[in-house]
Image: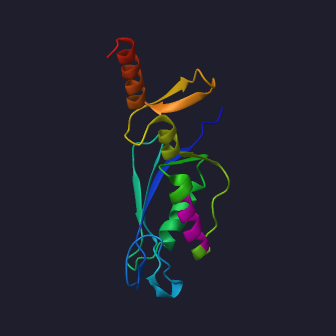
């Protein structure tokens, strides 16, 4: 039986550089005001069965093409890609920059996004989530363990007449 080749990876990107009068959210900045489009600064990766971590960086001219070509050669050997917020950030950025440079993109294969997994198991505060079955609707609801603790504490306080 062939073992799946699992590749862990992460990217870092540069900011956009542009002309604008104010900063903040929900601003409409025309594309013509962007002096330099952001790019991928570095990609780090590691194979599941290897202790060595590899790092690729953009070139001295801050161009990410060569780095992406090298990473794509590695990534195309993988059966699964594992990243934190990889499905919503890293992979779309890699694909976009590959398209920009005319580099062939990934074949289709499985991804594991550790952010998605952590959000289903932990609350924003980092506490474990617990599934509780509601007596009223008989559905399961996910709550953080601190919420669960508060529910249990309140329930017992009520029973003791406090």
For image coordinates 52% across by 32% down, the residue present is 142
Q: Is residue 76 above or below residue 135?
A: below
Dominant secondary structure of the residues highlighted in magenta in the image: helix
Q: Nearer the viewer, residue 55 or 127?
A: 127
Q: Is residue 12 above or below residue 24?
A: above
Would you say 71 lies left or right of 144 here?
right
List x then y, in percent, for residue 55.
Answer: 40, 58
View extreme (front): residue: 161
For image coordinates 51% across by 64% down, the residue present is 70
Q: Nearer the viewer, residue 33 or 162?
A: 162
Q: Is residue 94 magenta?
A: yes
For image coordinates 34% across by 13% down, the residue present is 161
Range covered by the magenta-colored residues? 91-99
Q: Is residue 145 above or below residue 35?
A: above
Placement of the C terminus among the 4 image quadrants: top left
Placement of the N terminus among the 4 image quadrants: top right
For image coordinates 51% across by 88% down, the residue present is 32
List x then y, in percent, for residue 58.
Answer: 42, 71
The figure's colour scheme reads rainbow
Q: Is residue 15 magenta?
A: no
List x then y, in percent, for residue 48.
Answer: 48, 41
List x then y, in percent, for residue 149.
Answer: 38, 25
Which of the 4 image quarters holds residue 21? bottom left
């Amino acid at each position: 039986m062939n073992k799946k080749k699992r590749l862990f990876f992460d990217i870092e990107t540069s900011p956009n550089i542009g002309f604008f009068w104010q900063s903040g959210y929900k601003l409409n900045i025309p594309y013509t005001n962007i002096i330099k489009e952001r790019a991928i600064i570095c990609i780090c990766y590691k194979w599941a069965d290897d202790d060595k971590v590899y790092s690729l960086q953009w070139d001295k001219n801050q161009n990410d093409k060569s780095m992406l070509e090298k990473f794509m050669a590695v990534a195309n050997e993988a059966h699964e890609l594992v990243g934190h917020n990889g499905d919503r950030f890293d992979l779309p950025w890699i694909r976009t920059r590959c398209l920009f440079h005319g580099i062939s993109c990934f074949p289709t294969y499985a991804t594991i996004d550790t952010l998605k997994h952590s959000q289903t198991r932990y609350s924003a505060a980092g506490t474990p989530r617990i599934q509780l079955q509601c007596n009223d609707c008989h559905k399961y609801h996910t709550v953080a363990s601190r919420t669960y603790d508060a529910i249990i504490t309140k329930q017992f306080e009520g029973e003791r007449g406090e």
